[in-house]
Amino acid sequence: MQWYYSKNATQLGPVSLDELRAKLASGEVLNTDMVWREGMPDWRPASSMFELAIPVAGPQAAPVAAEVVNTPYQPSGSGLYSPTEMLIPNYLWQSIVVTIFCCWPVGIPAIVYAAKVDGLKARGDIQGAMEASANAKKWCWISVAL
């Protein structure tokens, strides 16, 4: 499968997956650079592509490798992980329960954050989904405490 990447508003490629990984490892392509391959609806940052998130040497790789290692995954048959396979809890039912039975003013933010998780995950914004999940959990606990 051929990949394309963008540097300084210039589309470059096609390159193979291995070539793109090598460019990421060398720093020629940054984690913030946009990448695309056939079958993808839009260009995405290289750091959001699980096929590219491999532990490699270099200053760019450490944050991506740490993010991949510390994220719960549900394995697929291919060994690659797509955003829809990631297990990020949305805490929606917990948010609804604490809103009804505990403290509704604090439960409402929990529901709002919980409702964002699946949409962010579906768009490939894994970091945003993880933050929304953490915020939903935090507001659930605050509601229980009050």
Image: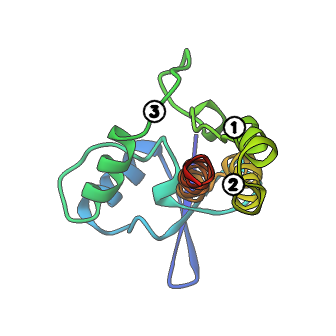
Q: CA distance from mark 3 to mark 1?
A: 20 Å
Q: Which residue is mark 1?
A: 94
Determine whether, in the image, residue 123 is placed left or right of residue 63. right
First reached walking from the N terminus: tag 3 or tag 1:
3
Task: Tell me: residue 67, above or below residue 34.
Answer: above
Residue type marked 3: Pro
The amino acid type of the residue labelled 2 equals Ala
Q: Residues within 10 Å of mark 3 (few under 14, many from 20)?
A: few
Which residue is rendered at x = 52% and y = 54% of the image? 48
Image quarter of residue 97 = top right
Q: Is residue 27 above or below residue 127?
A: below
Dot 2 alpha-carbon crowd within 10 angstroms: few under 14, some 14 to 19, many 20 or more: many
Q: Amino acid at mark 1?
A: Gln
- Give x and y (percent) for residue 19: 38, 50
Name the residue that disc number 2 marks.
110
The reply to whether dot 3 and dot 2 touch (C-beta < 8 Å) is no
Residue drawn 27% across the image and 44% down it: 55
Q: Nearer the viewer, mark 3 or mark 2?
A: 2
Q: What is the C-alpha distance between the residues marked 3 and 2?
A: 22 Å
Percent coordinates x, y for residue 92 in the rendering: 74, 41
Residue pictured at 59% horizontal, 59% vertical? 128
Of badges 3 and 1, nearer the viewer stands 1
